[in-house]
Amino acid sequence: MDLLQGKQGLVFGVANERSYAWHISKSLIDHGADCAFGVLPGDKMRARARLAIENLKLREEWVHPCDCSNDEDLFRIFDAYARDHDRLDFLIHSIAYADKSWLQPGAFPGTPRNVFMQAMDISVYSLVTMAERARPMMKESGGGSILSMSYLGAERAIPGYNVMGVAKAALEASTRYLANDMGEDNIRVNSISGGPLKTLAAAAIKGFKSLLSHDARRSPLARNVTGSDVGGTAVYLVSDLGAGVTGETIHVDCGASMVGF
């Protein structure tokens, strides 16, 4: 299928083949898109990300290290992308971080200021500043689609999710404000609220396995979400089929978010 033929974009957040960013990238590529990648700096993280990206079987790999909490790094990667590409149609933000020491039931009230601010900086502000960096090139391309990844913990208190849930709530609010301000340039901004998936980030949350089993039991589809489920929704939102959708948080969790306990 070629829903995304000719579209080019930048993906942040591939850590390995289990990450949502990897599954989204695979779905976009399967539908004809060309993906470039921003990955965490550091030899170990870069090597792991590169291995996962190699398995996407790209015609040509474009991978740059980027510390999204560093403004200079963000300027550099967008400048480098603009030098090597003639358009920017989509931006995938699949980045989040909070100190795992504070991601356990009962720990939220004691969250230190620096832990709180770091979670907000990496998980939320990075979306805002990336959107601003992407805006000029997207405008030249006739518009674009920006996607971020959220979770139900933004709306409900999930034991152990703590400051990450607060950050995701801010991420969803930022999605709406960005959509409002960037719509005049035909730039759409949406968030996908994916169900729990076994990723490196999820491993930091105490009790994550119980979240998986709980969601599988109560979801109308009687299963956990898969990476390809979320990837398919990303294809829709990036493609022209989603041309009228902006400022939304779309749940892709097999229906678990809409049923009672």
Image (tube, helix red, strand yellow):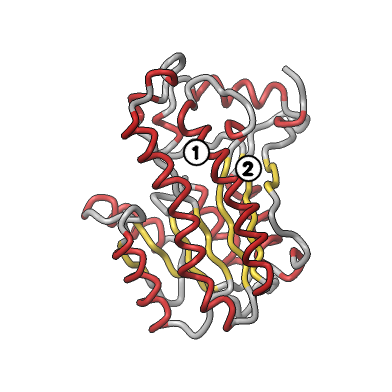
Residue 139 horizontal side relative to residue 107, left or right: right
Residue 27 horizontal side relative to residue 106, left or right: right
Give me the C-alpha separation between circle 2 and circle 1.
13 Å
Per the image, the residue denoted by label 1 is 167
**Dot 2: element:** strand
Q: Nearer the viewer, residue 112 or 19?
A: 112
Per the image, the residue denoted by label 2 is 193
Measured from the top left, where is residue 38 in percent x and y?
38, 62
Q: Given the current orientation, which residue lies at the most extreme left position? A: 43
Looking at the image, is 100 positioned above or below residue 177?
above
Residue 90 horizontal side relative to residue 97, left or right: right
Q: Amino acid at mark 2?
A: Ser
| First reached walking from the N terminus: tag 2 or tag 1 | 1
Of the two numbered discs 2 and 1 in the rendering, the one whose residue sits closer to the viewer: 1
Look at 43% across and 21% down and name the residue there.
Answer: 206
Measured from the top left, where is residue 104 in percent x and y?
42, 20
**Dot 1: element:** helix
Q: Quadrant of residue 116?
A: top left
Look at 69% across and 54% down and name the residue there.
Answer: 247
Measured from the top left, where is residue 32 in percent x and y?
61, 73
Q: Quadrant of residue 31?
A: bottom right
* Count of residue discs: 2
Measured from the top left, where is residue 167 in percent x and y?
49, 38
Q: Dot 2, crowdedness within 10 Å: few (<14), some or many (≥20)?
A: many
Quadrant where the C terminus is found in the figure: top right
Looking at the image, is 179 positioned above or below residue 15?
below
Q: Amino acid at mark 1?
A: Ala
Look at 57% across and 50% down and name the residue there.
Answer: 174
